Amino acid sequence: MNLGDGGGDLPSSSALSQWTHTARRYQHLLDKSTPLVLHRWIGFAFIAFVFSLRVYLVQGYYIVTYGLGIYILQLFILFLSPQVDPEIHDGPTLPTRGSDEFRPFVRRLPEFKFWYSITKAFCVAFVLTFFSAFDVPVFWPILLFYWVILFVSTMKRQIMHMIKYKYVPFSFGKQRYTGKKVALADDTDTTEA
């Protein structure tokens, strides 16, 4: 049998081509969702609500939720951090004076990757809630207290870093500059009829 004639399909090659087609389609949907920031975050809020509802209804999987919380905290810190840390980088830094040239804030973890990672994490955590091996009996208030302490101390350190190097990782829309307003003069023709 000649494999080059195209007459026979091998089962593994058709499965591989189907998988690559599915992967391309998935990537295409991700690419189309990139500019739809509000819609993506609404979808994430729905997934987070479903996960929270699942954990509340089964009254368990607190270790999974705690691990998810630590992962979210780590992603959030990366989202708030500049791509080039001014503390360890010797090259160009963020502007600290008004005379310094403007350099836009570039995140270590861009918004799309942050959304994608956090959404995947919630989906994986949701799937883990269907396996009893991950339902470890723990006293959840201690985990919650420890997570809050971890969050406060980490955010304090991050905010101190932001103050020290004078950067703000948030921008609420592009600044719009308007020129001088020009008064419109009434041009009335005084023609005699």
Image (cartoon, rainbow, N blue to C red):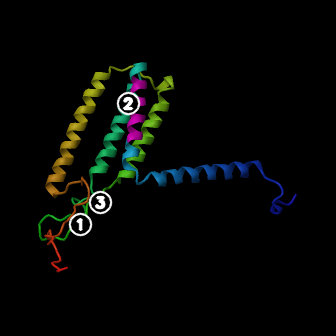
Q: Which mark is residue 106?
A: 3
**Badge 2: few (under 14), some or many (20 or more) residues near its Cα, within 10 Å?**
many
**Badge 1: few (under 14), some or many (20 or more) residues near its Cα, within 10 Å?**
few
Query: Quarter holding the N terminus?
Result: bottom right
The amino acid type of the residue labelled 3 equals: Val
Looking at marks 1 and 2 on the same chain, the residue that comes earlier in the sequence is marked by: 2
Front position among marks 1 and 2: 1
Magenta residues, start to end? 42-55
Q: Gap between marks 3 and 2, in whole Å?
A: 30 Å
Expressed as whole percent of the image width and height from the top left, the position of residue 189 reads: 17, 77
Expressed as whole percent of the image width and height from the top left, the position of residue 39 reads: 40, 45
Expressed as whole percent of the image width and height from the top left, the position of residue 138 reads: 36, 21
Residue that carries the numbered disc 1 in the rendered image: 103
Discs 3, 2 touching: Cβ within 8 Å = no
**Mark 1 falls on what kind of element?**
loop
Answer whether residue 64 is visible to the viewer in this image.
Answer: no
Expressed as whole percent of the image width and height from the top left, the position of residue 23 reads: 58, 51
Q: Which mark is residue 65?
A: 2
Is residue 57 one of those drawn in magenta? Answer: no
Looking at marks 3 and 2 on the same chain, the residue that comes earlier in the sequence is marked by: 2
Quarter location, residue 86: bottom left
